[in-house]
Amino acid sequence: MTAISRRRTIALIDYDNARIEPITAERNAGAVQVGCLSIIEALTAALVASGASYGEIRARFYGGWLHEDGRWTERAEWMREELRNMRGLRHGIRLLPELAVALMSQPRRDIRGTARIRTDRSGYSHQQKMVDTMLCVDLVLMSLAPDEDIVVVSDDDDVIPAMIVAQATLGRIRLFRHRELGKSCNDHHLRELGLPITVFRPVQ
């Protein structure tokens, strides 16, 4: 009997954009645990429901993980611990989660300054830099790999140009987001390219 081939998927997750709760809600490790689990549970369940036979998901979480001096942010430290605990089987799919601190094509070059802390009249301001750019660069690069499907988890229209290029190149891209179909002014491009959009609402 011939074995059924199970597909591999890489999930590019814009963490803060994929969550329902605002970033300010994550003030401890427990809140980070809830955020990570809600995204992974919703993602794996939706992939199983799609009917495709997925054997493995490499889940890359993009966010403001490194200060300008190269130190991990406190939230990144919480995330690292939680993602280590999440490795294993979920809904029959092998999960390999990781923090995206470097580009996939340059894994030894950590991108510093994705987390920025600035002071203004109201006090400290936490900002993210280069996060969308890192995700988009990885997306276009992965579209050249013919043996993996790609899932993008983001509600940010900044990823749309890269998704158009990746879908036109590979043709196996899926988008998970919060908004209903037709709510983005560029949805017609994705429809014309046959890119599936799944409404994604993690339960927290």
Image: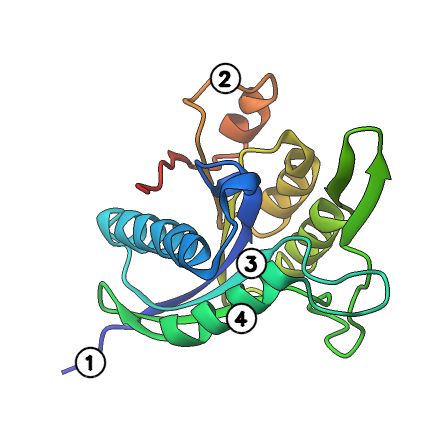
Circle nearer the N terminus (4, 1)? 1
Q: Amino acid at mark 3?
A: Phe
Q: Amino acid at mark 4?
A: Arg
Q: Residue at label 4?
A: 80
Q: Residue at label 2?
A: 183
3 vs 1, front mark: 3
Q: Residue at label 1?
A: 2
Circle nearer the N terminus (4, 2)? 4
Q: Relative to 44, say whether 101 is above or below.
A: below
Q: Amino acid at mark 1?
A: Thr
Q: Relative to 34, say whether 22 is above or below.
A: above
Q: Please report the residue visible at 47 percent of the width from the left and 41 percent of the height from the top.
A: 19
As helix, strand or loop, the secondary structure at mark 2 comes to: loop
Q: Please report the residue visible at 43 percent of the width from the left and 52 percent of the height from the top.
A: 31
Circle nearer the N terminus (3, 2)? 3
**Which mark is on residue 61?**
3
**How far across and down, in percent of the image, does residue 2 sit?**
20, 80
Between the residue at mark 4 and the residue at mark 1, the CA separation in whole angstroms equals 39 Å
| Residue 36 found in image quarter | bottom left
**How far across and down, in percent of the image, does residue 30 sit?**
40, 58
Label 3 Cα neighbours within 10 Å, binned few <14 / some 14-19 / many ≥20: many
Circle nearer the N terminus (3, 1)? 1
Circle nearer the N terminus (3, 4)? 3
